[in-house]
């Protein structure tokens, strides 16, 4: 069959190559009693909190499995709006909240709604690779803005203003970011919003890791900047509901009607049982548990980052959220792709090379996900240390 031309713009998701190779190696190692330590996929090692699971089971038993309205259950939209008021001090009308099939569903809808064929969307380099493909699926092009440790691997307002061209429709950012775990400072984000308003474009912020923040200097929702910002969020990370495939977006009032029309046609509605389960996310017991888990992620960060730095795997910016480390392997290798696969083959520690996330200096960087136990993180650091020592000895003999 002849494929649509747009598929040529959809880039590979290289992390899946890593996962496939790791699975094959794990199958070989298991009979030998050897284990792999997976620090690759960005998935919490916790499952949904018990109240959420119980609410989901009740929904199934009580037959609450039919279609909902396209924007989602009114009660869940209200619960999310109330959470913004209680946690962030931001008033959001529940009508502006749309429940979606994960954050991916939200990004798909937003790009189809706002991106014209032939237009471009500005985003940082490095970035989550699928974000480029959401834009490509709508016929647009992602224009990547190179970033560095000096700007916390986030674009600046000045950089966005300078890059804005006739084809630019808007900006797609993430704070905290995957793969870097770094956020945009509130004052810089305000300057970015002012540039986008001046240019007449859209500002879309992926905030799926917003609640997994560790630094009070960050962690305020971009919705505090006004009603024109589009915020994308998810139940996958903070509430650990990855496979439930449920997210949400908050949109300006003028997008409510066209978004309802688009969502109803493309998705009909999000998963009904998942929505009923998600109502329990905002109960006091659930929030206490998710906060306990957030603190555990911070503890893991504080174990693995110093360990990497001690090994000469530089982490120039301490992650302030999410569960990722963006680390520099250039002291040990000129090619992070070869480095990560060599580490996996020799040690069983699974890392993701920077090629998946960056075009600018991607060969220097790799991403580590610390969504794993402290014991496994310490074991991984030990294996990496032994590997780097062996590598140094081999190079010295060569």
Image: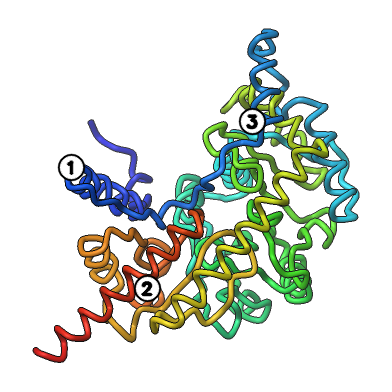
Side of 281 where 146 appears, left or right: left
- Can you give x and y, in whole percent of width and height, for residue 384 in the image? 33, 71
Q: For the view shown, which residue lies furthest in the bottom direction? A: 396
Q: Is 319 situated above or below 13?
A: below
Between the C-alphas of marks 1 and 2, the distance is 35 Å
Residue pointed to by mark 3: 263
Q: Secondary structure at mark 2?
A: helix
Q: Is residue 148 visible?
A: yes
Quarter assignment of residue 39: bottom left
Give the residue drawn at x 65%, y 48%: 238
- Can you give x and y, in whole percent of width and height, for residue 371 in the image? 51, 54
Mark in the foreground, 1 or 3: 1
The mark that comes first in sequence, 2 or 3, is 3
Pick the residue in front: 329 or 169.
329
Q: Is the C-beta separation of discs 1 and 2 under 8 Å?
A: no
Q: Is 89 situated above or below 239?
A: below
Residue pointed to by mark 1: 31
Give the residue drawn at x 26%, y 63%: 347
Quarter assignment of residue 174: bottom right
The mark that comes first in sequence, 1 or 3, is 1
């Amino acid at each position: 069959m002849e494929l649509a031309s747009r598929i040529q713009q959809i880039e590979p998701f290289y992390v899946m190559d890593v996962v496939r190779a790791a699975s094959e190696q794990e199958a070989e190692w298991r009979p030998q009693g050897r284990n792999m330590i997976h620090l690759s996929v960005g998935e919490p090692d916790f499952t949904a909190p018990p109240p959420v699971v119980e609410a989901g089971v009740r929904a199934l038993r009580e037959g609450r499995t039919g279609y909902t309205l396209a924007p989602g259950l009114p009660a869940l939209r209200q619960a999310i709006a109330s959470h913004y008021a209680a946690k962030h001090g931001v008033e959001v009308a529940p009508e502006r909240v749309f429940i979606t099939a994960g954050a991916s569903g939200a990004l798909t809808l937003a790009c189809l709604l706002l991106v014209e064929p032939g237009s471009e969307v500005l985003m940082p380099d490095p970035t989550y690779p699928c974000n480029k493909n959401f834009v490509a699926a709508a016929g647009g092009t992602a224009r990547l803005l190179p970033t560095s440790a000096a700007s916390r691997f986030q674009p600046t307002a000045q950089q966005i203003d300078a890059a804005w061209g006739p084809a630019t429709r808007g900006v797609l950012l993430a704070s905290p970011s995957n793969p870097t775990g770094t956020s945009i400072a509130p004052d810089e984000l305000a300057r970015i919003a002012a540039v986008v308003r001046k240019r007449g474009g859209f500002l879309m912020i992926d905030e799926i890791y917003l609640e997994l923040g560790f630094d009070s200097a960050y962690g305020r929702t971009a919705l505090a900047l006004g009603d024109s910002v589009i915020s994308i969020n998810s139940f996958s990370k903070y509430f650990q509901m990855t496979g439930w495939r449920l997210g949400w977006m908050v949109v300006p009032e003028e997008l409510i009607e066209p978004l309802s029309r688009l969502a109803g046609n493309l998705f009909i509605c999000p998963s009904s049982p998942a929505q009923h389960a998600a109502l329990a996310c905002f109960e006091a017991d659930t929030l206490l548990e998710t906060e306990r888990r957030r603190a555990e992620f911070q503890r893991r960060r504080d174990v693995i980052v110093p360990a990497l730095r001690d090994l000469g795997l530089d982490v120039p910016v301490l992650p302030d959220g999410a569960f990722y480390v963006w680390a520099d392997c250039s002291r040990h290798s000129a090619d992070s792709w070869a480095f990560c696969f060599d580490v996996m083959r020799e040690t069983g520690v699974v890392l993701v090379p920077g090629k998946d996330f960056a075009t600018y200096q991607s060969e220097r960087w790799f991403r580590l996900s610390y969504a794993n136990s402290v014991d496994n993180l310490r074991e991984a650091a030990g294996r990496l240390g032994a590997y780097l020592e062996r590598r140094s000895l081999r190079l010295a003999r060569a």
